[in-house]
Image: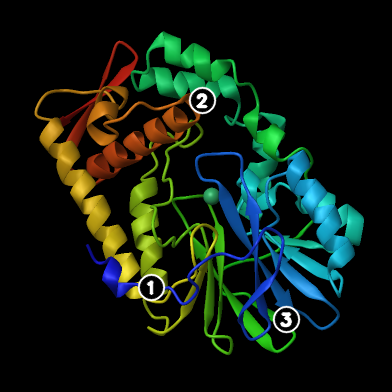
């Protein structure tokens, strides 16, 4: 409804693995993803001796074949790699690219550790912990068995991880060639997501925190079952509000856009609407799994089911933290009802 408020200066994405200039010294690189979300945007930034690369693509064979070709074609080497967060489409080739071109990886501490925990299936980040978490939220045994059959999906998208990195923390300044970038940490989609803002370039590399058409997945996971992930996400959006209105936003998915304030308003409105839908459905006691048809009135495949249930729990925890719904443990299962 507010889409008119967003301005898309580029009508179409560049051809796969063909860098296109989007701002002075900043280039757009698009790669395919084998999911319903079928692409990711990476960003090459002119650096003193080559290019800094923001995000690396999924660590699968087609992406690596493309990278091999692209590395041979690029006019200058990669100087450093920056990962916005731990998700496979962003971090999948970090160690692989580092090993090939010697470029060091920069990322947030929490993202680095979480990647390792998921890769090693430890610290409450294993499949058994996820299944127990979803069972507690009412997921049926057939769906649990289908999720169990998938095994360690993180390792499939991120086959190897680096053993050292440069830490990026909130407010850190990073200089690349002509531009200085400030790291803005955001929560909710991942623990310490890094977005990069450059005043001189007039650009915000927003990663998954600000996307033009879809809302990033906000999930509550087994290791932090009582977390208000949605509250943290909405709070993090406020960090972008002081940025200039004409900032060109470079998102990880979709097209670059202007209108970041309209977009944060839309995201607040979207989640408020979802909250209202849930409160209305919670006249009677419900589990998170029981609310899935209300939140997502369409068939979900196993991949979508995992995200959808995590998101339903995030909404329920958010309402619970705000004192709008009450939570009760019944026979090992968590149930929610409107206060
Ligand atoms: Zn992500």
> Sequence order check: which comes first, mark 3 or mark 2?
2
Left or right: residue 194 compared with residue 332: right
Residues marked 1 and 3 touching at CB (< 8 Å): no
Left or right: residue 94 compared with residue 275: right
Foreground: 223 or 262?
262
Foreground: 27 or 106?
27
| Helix, strand or loop at mark 2 | helix
What residue appears at the point 47 percent right and 50 percent down from the top-left corner?
189
Left or right: residue 138 compared with residue 103: left
Instruction: Give the percent coordinates (x, y) of residue 263.
Output: 34, 67
Image: 3 above or below 144? below
Q: Between tags 3 and 2, which lies in front?
A: 3
| Residue 339 shows in this picture | no
Left or right: residue 280 compared with residue 296: left
Foreground: 298 or 137?
298
What residue appears at the point 11 percent right and 24 percent down from the top-left corner?
284
Instruction: Give the percent coordinates (x, y) of residue 43.
Output: 65, 68
Which circle marks residue 8 in the picture?
Answer: none
Few, some or many residues within 10 Å of mark 2 (<14, 14–19, 20+)? many
Residues marked 1 and 2 touching at CB (< 8 Å): no
The mark tally for this picture is 3
State whether label 3 is within 8 Å of ligand 1. Answer: no
Which circle marks residue 176 in the picture?
Answer: 3
Q: CA distance from mark 3 to mark 2?
A: 40 Å
Instruction: Give the percent coordinates (x, y) of residue 196.
Output: 57, 72
**Residue at mark 1:** 260
Which circle marks residue 130 in the picture?
Answer: 2
Image: 307 above or below 251? above
Q: Between tags 1 and 3, which lies in front?
A: 1
| Helix, strand or loop at mark 3 | strand
Q: Quadrant of residue 195?
A: bottom right
Q: Quadrant of residue 240?
A: bottom left
């Amino acid at each position: 409804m507010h889409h008119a408020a967003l301005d898309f200066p580029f009508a179409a994405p560049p051809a796969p693995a063909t860098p296109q200039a989007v701002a002075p010294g900043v280039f757009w690189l698009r790669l395919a993803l084998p999911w319903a979300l079928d692409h990711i945007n990476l960003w090459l930034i002119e650096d003193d001796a080559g290019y800094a690369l923001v995000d690396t693509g999924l660590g699968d064979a087609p992406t690596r074949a493309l990278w091999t070709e692209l590395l041979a074609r690029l006019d200058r080497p990669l100087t450093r790699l920056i990962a916005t967060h731990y998700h496979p489409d962003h971090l999948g080739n970090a160690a692989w690219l580092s090993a090939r071109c010697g470029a060091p990886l920069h990322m947030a501490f929490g993202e680095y550790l979480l990647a390792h925990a998921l890769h090693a299936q430890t610290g409450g980040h294993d499949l058994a912990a996820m299944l127990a978490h979803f069972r507690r939220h009412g997921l049926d045994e057939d769906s649990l068995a289908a999720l169990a059959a998938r095994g360690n999906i993180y390792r499939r998208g991120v086959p190897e991880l680096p053993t050292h990195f440069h830490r990026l923390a909130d407010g850190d300044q990073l200089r690349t060639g002509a531009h200085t970038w400030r790291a803005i940490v955001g929560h909710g989609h991942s623990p310490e997501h890094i977005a990069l803002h450059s005043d001189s370039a007039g650009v915000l590399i927003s990663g998954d925190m600000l996307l033009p058409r879809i809302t990033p997945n906000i999930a509550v996971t087994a290791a932090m079952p009582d977390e208000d992930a949605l509250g943290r996400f909405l709070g993090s959006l406020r960090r972008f509000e002081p940025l200039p209105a004409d900032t060109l936003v470079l998102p990880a998915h979709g097209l670059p856009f202007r209108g970041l304030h309209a977009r944060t308003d839309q995201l607040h409105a979207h989640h408020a609407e979802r909250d209202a839908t849930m409160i209305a459905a919670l006249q009677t006691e419900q589990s998170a799994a029981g609310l899935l048809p209300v939140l997502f009135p369409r068939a979900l495949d196993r991949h979508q089911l995992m995200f959808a249930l995590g998101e339903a729990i995030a909404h329920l925890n958010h309402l619970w933290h705000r004192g709008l719904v009450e939570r009760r443990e019944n026979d090992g299962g968590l149930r929610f009802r409107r206060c």
